[in-house]
Image (tube, rainbow, N blue to C red):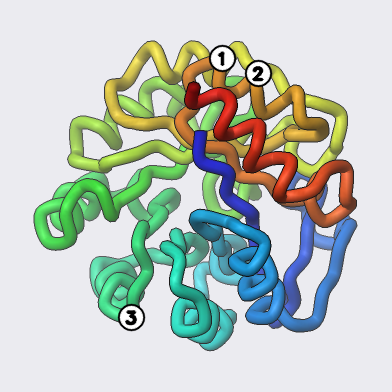
Amino acid sequence: MEIIPAIDIKNGKCIQLVQGKPGTEQISIENPVKVAITWEQEGAPRLHVIDLDGAIEGQRKNAKFIREIIASVSIPVQVGGGIRTYEDALSLFEIGADRIILGTAAIKNPKLVEDLSKQMGPEHVMGAVDSKGGKVLIKGWQESTEFSTIELAKLFEKSGAGSILFTNVEVEGKLEGLDPRPIEDLVQSVKIPVIASGGITKLDDIATLAKAGAQGAIIGLALYKKNFSLKEALEIGRITDC
C-alpha cells in the first residue's frame, strides 16, 4: 500500500482542518514547501497537495506554493483544489504534477475527465469522491449533491479516470478512527485503484484500509500530531503488500 502524506495549503500555510471546515485549524505551518521537502527526506513515495482556497473559492490562490513544491521534490506530486478547467489541469501537468485531482468541475462536466485522460493518460487523472452520509460533496465540501459515492466513482471510471480518491468527510480530521465499509463497497464497485483518505488515527487503521482493498492511504493530521511516524506508516504499508 502506498502511504501518502497530505499537504493542505490555505493562505500560504500548511494546515489541517476538521471535516474541511474553515476556522477549525488543528495544525498551521508557515512554509509548505519546507514541509514537502521534509516528507520526501523521511521517505514519502508521493505527496498529496491540495489548494484549500481553490477548493472552497474556486480560485487557485496557492498556485505559487504548489509550483515550488513540484520543483523542489523529486517524488510524484498529486494536486487538487480549485482545478475548474481543462487549461487549469493541463498547466499543472505541464509543470510536473503527476496526478491531477478533479472533483467539482468533473461533476459538472464529465467530459473534462475524458478529454484530460486522452491528453495526459488515465494514470494522471484522479477523480475525487468526497462523501458524507453517502452523498458526494463539492466546492471544498461546502455543498452537497445528489450523487451517491458509488454513482460518481463509476462515472469517473467510465469517463477515463485512472484512479479514485475517496475521502470520508464524516471522519476527516477528527482522529477518532475510520469506517472501512464505504471503502469496501467502493473497491468492489470499480476496477480502478481506490486511494483512501479521512479518519486515519493509528497504525492499525492503515492495515484496515489495506484489508478493505484500498491501494493507497493519504495521511494528514495523524502524522502532524505525531500519532505515529511516517517511517512506521511506511513499514505497515510494506507489510500489507506482502
Dot 3 or dot 1: first in sequence order is: 3
Choose between 161 and 206: the one closer to the eye: 206
Which residue is painted at 74% across and 82% down in the image?
31
The answer to whether residue 144 shows anywhere in this view is: no
Which disc number belongs to residue 191? Answer: none
Q: CA distance from mark 2 to mark 3?
A: 35 Å
Position of 25 with respect to 33 (left or right) is right
Dot 1 corresponds to which residue? 211
Amino acid of disc 2: Thr
Label 1 sits on a secondary structure element that is: helix
Which residue is painted at 71% across and 48% down in the image?
231
* Residue 161 spot, x, y in % from top left: 26, 42
Dot 2 corresponds to which residue? 208
* Residue 172 spot, x, y in % from top left: 74, 39
Position of 92 with respect to 34 (left or right) is left
- Image-quadrant location for residue 192: top left
Which residue is painted at 58% across and 43% down in the image?
3
Q: Circle 1: is it few (<14), some (14-19), or many (20+) Cα within 10 Å?
A: some
The answer to whether residue 159 shows anywhere in this view is: yes
Asked if the residue at tag 1 contacts the one at tag 2, i.e. Cβ–Cβ closer than 8 Å, the answer is yes
- Image-quadrant location for residue 176: top right
Amino acid of disc 1: Lys
Q: Is residue 16 above or below residue 74?
A: above
Which of labels 2 and 3 is toward the front? 2
Choose between 42 and 52: the one closer to the eye: 42
Asked if the residue at tag 3 contacts the one at tag 2, i.e. Cβ–Cβ closer than 8 Å, the answer is no
Choose between 76 and 99: the one closer to the eye: 76
* Residue 218 spot, x, y in % from top left: 60, 44
Q: CA distance from mark 2 to mark 1?
A: 5 Å
Dot 3 corresponds to which residue? 95
Q: CA distance from mark 3 to mark 1?
A: 35 Å
